[in-house]
Amino acid sequence: MSDIVLASGVEKMTDCSGDEATAALATAAEQEYEVFNGATFPGLYGMMANAHMHQYGTTRDMLSAVAVKNHHNGALNPVAQYPFEVSMEQVAGSVMVADPLRILDCSGITDGAAAVIVTSVDVAKKLGRPYVRILGSGVGTDTIALTQRSSFTSIPAAKLAAERALSMAGRKMEDIQFAEVHDCFTIAELMILETLGVYEPGEAGPATLAGETSLDGTFPVNSSGGLKSKGHAVGATGVAQAVEVYKQLTGRAEGDRQIPGHPRVGMCHNMGGSGASSVVHIMEVGS
Amino acid sequence: MTMFSSRAWREYPQRYRLEASKFKKSGKTYFPPRKVDPETGDTEREIVRLPDTGKLLTFTVIRIAPSQWGDLAPYAIGIAELTDGTRIMAQFTDCDVEEVKIGMDVRIEFRRVQEEGHHGVISYGYKFVPKWY
């Protein structure tokens, strides 16, 4: 076993055409019965968004509020891919990709890399740099096909992953003070927050509109700008989320995006496919 | 996706005839067919044909499509629950995408789904049409 390990992720997507990138990404979806019939990733999330709107009355404004908030945070992040603000009107007026999702509801095609150093608390103390402790980690899986899921309006794999991580950490969801979540599409952020139990089903949208998930809100979400604004370099996304949780916990978030009040416990949630798998980590500032 | 003829051939029973597997113990039907019931581990099954009507659970209209589907865009695609409770995802055809609504009655028809260039395999399968069609 090694004492000090570098965990990294890297992605290069801009050298291929949009078509090639879409086809490559779609291999994470069910090929034989969904992609074969014309499903795309925005299409699968569009189906989830339509189901969510139908069941809970989620609105265009609620989806737009996720993009506006994440772009606001990303504009403060010096390494964000799209470091600019967008308005509710710009999101609502952007081109439709897959109903009801518009281009500003979608994360982009991104190049990027991220790395963290994983070691024991003893070694971390010796190194003398600020560190965070991984309190718990969990993985959850589900069917690859959206058609076979028990729910189109939540991410059951994320629930499993969070339960396992919380159980390992010996914590409750109420102990978590902020999170980085996999907002590949605006609807995904709302569904994940409801699945993790931060909000009741149907209530993440109104809470986002009310500013509860903003940097100065009661439960800041995606302070980095998220996949939406910071970028979704697929192979690097999970590690990049851990980097943001580290920065927030150690008070090192640049550009005025530091969450106020010195949060001590944070969570990151990453997923694959249209929710076929999820990984959750819970971290606490080292002392 | 490259559609090798052997792979296409293996899918004929379900894509051409909507064949599904119904398990003895649970009475549950799976589409596409499974050899083992994931809930009970049961392997005793019969091949049944899915009903061809159902209700739309959710859908989307794909307006920006990969080039393979480009000439069909905008097209609607959705998930329906059929009258026996099984679910299936399919593309809509022969209807105005603005007519597609959650809860609408749909019927499944046999159609050409895609082809790979001028010399590739032509893949047939099923598509949704409004039930009244």
Image (tube, rainbow, N blue to C red):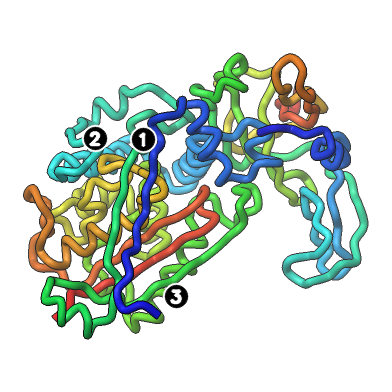
Residue A256 left/right relative to B22: left
Left or right: residue A232 versus residue B35 is: left
| Residue drawn 91% across the image and 52% down it | B47
The disc label shown at residue A108, or none = 1
Count neighbours of disc 3 (C-alpha within 10 A) and say few if under 14, some if 14 to 19, many if 20 or more: many
Is A201 drawn above or below residue B10 in the view shown?
below
Residue B89 position within the rendered picture, expressed as x and y whole percent measured from the top left:
67, 39
Which residue is disc 3 drawn over? A164
Marks 3 & 2 on one chain: yes
Looking at the figure, which quarter contains the N terminus of chain B? top right
Q: Quadrant of the C terminus of chain B?
A: top right
What residue is pinned by disc 2?
Answer: A82
- Label 2 marks a residue whose chain is A
- Residue at 16% of width from left, 67% of height from top? A249
- Give the x, y percent position of residue A133: 25, 76
Single out the mark in the foreground, 1 or 3. Answer: 1
